[in-house]
Image (cartoon, grey):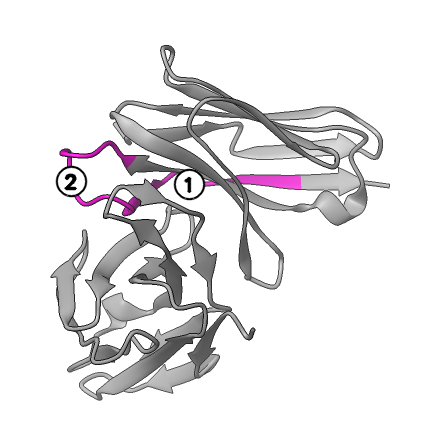
């Protein structure tokens, strides 16, 4: 079983819909990262969080440490949000090298106009 | 700032050839990483470095070597290329304070390598 699992693997939405991508992990972590990979291949960091909730524009990320689960929400989705969204975790101190990320396989999102 | 830069963007190698993938960051980050991304799989860590002169193996180091002589540069060397090394390679960097307080990772644009 992978240490980081994402669902769904693929997601198609209509423009304007509210989107949720889920991430579950099975290891102790110091932080969880949400990344976006554009169709051209570039990867950018969206969020890094270790508790609670963060918001940037139409994107919201939440994490529940007790349940080892995080969600990425996109409100009022737009075709330009089409990308692969990747969840990654960094191990808690003492459990391997700090800062090294363990990645999920990604969720491919397609938003139709 | 240019961020993290990688060269080349694309490369085709014949089996048995060698090459070096270049990575440079201008953010004074202490940590640097090399990942590979295969279709349908999550990124896998090849090697990482916590500072100049210090490197260590990641999850999939076989067939690769690295060096870190400066804070800015972290080249990845492929010796005796094999078809299994066909992949997209990403370099990344981040800053960790005191080895424990981490910040987000910044990724380079990637190198698409084909070994035939």
> Which of the 4 image quarters holds residue B30?
bottom left
Vertical placement of A108 versus B7: above or below? above
Task: Provide the residue designation for mark 1.
Answer: A105
Magenta region: A91-109
> With B77 as the anchor, is B112 left or right in this view?
right
Task: Tell me the residue at 35%/81% (across/down).
Answer: B22
Could one spot residue B63 in this view of the protein? no
Vertical placement of A20 versus A103: above or below? above
Query: Which mark, residue A48?
Result: none
Q: Position of residue A4 (x, y in %)?
A: 35, 31
Vertical placement of A51 versus A67: above or below? below
Q: Quadrant of the C terminus of chain A?
A: top right
- Which residue is the extreme one toward the front? B98
**Chain bearing mark 2:** A
Task: Tell me the residue at 53%/28% (across/down).
Answer: A8
Vertical placement of A83 versus A15: above or below? below
Task: Tell me the residue at 44%/77% (across/down).
Answer: B6
**Chain bearing mark 1:** A
User: Do circles 2 and 1 both sit on a common chain?
Assistant: yes
Crowd class of label 2 (few under 14; some 14 to 19; many from 20; radius 10 Å): few
Task: Provide the residue designation for mark 2.
Answer: A96
> With B100 as the anchor, is A96 left or right in this view?
left
Identify the secondary structure beneath mark 1. loop
Image marks 2 and 1: residues in contact by CB distance under 8 Å: no
Task: Tell me the residue at 20%/80% (across/down).
Answer: B69
Look at the image and say whether residue A92 sits in the magenta stretch: yes
């Amino acid at each position: 079983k992978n240490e980081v699992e994402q669902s769904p693997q693929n997601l198609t939405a209509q423009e304007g819909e509210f989107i949720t991508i889920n991430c579950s992990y099975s290891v102790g972590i110091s932080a969880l990262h949400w990344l976006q990979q554009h169709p051209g291949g570039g990867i950018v960091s969206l969020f890094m969080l270790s508790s609670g909730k963060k918001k940037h524009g139409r994107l919201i990320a939440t994490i529940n440490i007790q349940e080892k689960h995080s969600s990425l929400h996109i409100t009022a989705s737009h075709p330009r949000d089409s990308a692969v969204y990747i969840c990654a975790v960094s191990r808690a101190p003492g459990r391997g090298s700090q800062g090294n990320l363990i990645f999920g396989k990604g969720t491919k999102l397609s938003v139709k106009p | 700032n240019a961020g993290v830069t990688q060269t080349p963007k694309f490369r085709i190698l014949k089996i048995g050839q060698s090459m070096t993938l270049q990575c440079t960051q201008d953010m004074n980050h202490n940590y640097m990483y090399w990942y590979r991304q295969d279709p349908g799989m999550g990124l896998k860590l090849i090697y990482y470095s916590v500072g100049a002169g210090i490197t260590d193996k990641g999850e999939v180091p076989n067939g690769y070597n690295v060096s870190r002589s400066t804070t800015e540069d972290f080249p990845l060397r492929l010796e005796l290329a094999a078809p299994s090394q066909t992949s997209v390679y990403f370099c990344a960097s981040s800053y960790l304070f005191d080895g424990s307080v981490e910040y987000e990772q910044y990724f380079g644009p990637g190198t698409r390598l084909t070994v035939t």
